[in-house]
Image (spheres, grey):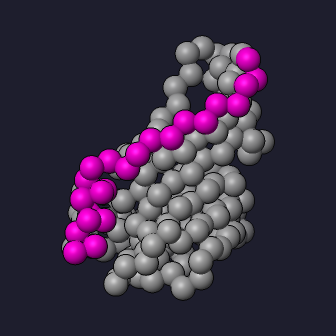
Amino acid sequence: DKDTSGLLLICKNNFAHKEIASQLETHSMHREYIALVDGIITSDSGKIIGKIGRSKENRLKMAIDNINGKEAITHFEVLKRYKKYTLIKCRLETGRTHQIRVHMSSINHPLVGDKIYGGSTSLYNEGQLLHAYNLTFSQPSTKKEVNVQIDLPQYFIDVLNKLEN
């Protein structure tokens, strides 16, 4: 997603690309995100299952489509609750376009700053507060497990600090 911060994996050749694509397809690659969502999520963790397809009303959006959509599963865990927001960690079991954004919006907890999927913009309006912070995959040539993590960007930290005060 355009406004998602964090890790990006780039393949140097076709062999690496095919191997990484295979890991995505077989769900052997693990991707975790940090997100700030609107509202208070009361359960400490959960699993959202909802097929995702192109929105019939707006071609720029994806939507829950349990008839024509593709399987999509997102696991979430609450990291911290604020007065009007919840900080969560998400782990993707599948990888559909806008998956976290669609799934969180579908349970009435859109991402803060996400104008497309109904997130509030009073706290942050420069795009959704979604950060790809952890990636685990098998290195294509050596097959060794690689785990890469990256800290939250400063603007995300600034928003969280604002909520603390």
- Tell me the quarter of the picture where residue 14 sits: top right
User: Which residue occupies 22% across, 75% down?
Assistant: 165
Q: Is residue 44 above or below residue 1?
A: below
Residue 71 versus residue 54: which sits nearer the camera? 71
> Most extreme residue toward the front, as rendered?
165
148 to the left or right of 24: left
Res. 65 visible in picture: no
The image shows residue 5, relative to residue 107, as above or below, that is above
Residue 44, relative to residue 158: is it above or below? below
Question: Which quadrant of the view contains residue 130?
Answer: bottom left
Q: Residue at x 72, y 59 (%)?
A: 71
Q: Position of residue 145 (x, y in %)?
A: 70, 31
Asked if residue 142 can be seen in this view, the reply is: yes
Q: Residue at x 62, y 74 (%)?
A: 45
Q: Residue at x 53, y 31 (%)?
A: 9
Residue 80 is one of the magenta-drawn residues: no
Q: Nearer the viewer, residue 10 or 61?
A: 10
State the residue in front, 139 or 96.
139
The residues colored magenta run 142-165
Residue 32 location, x and y as percent?
A: 57, 51
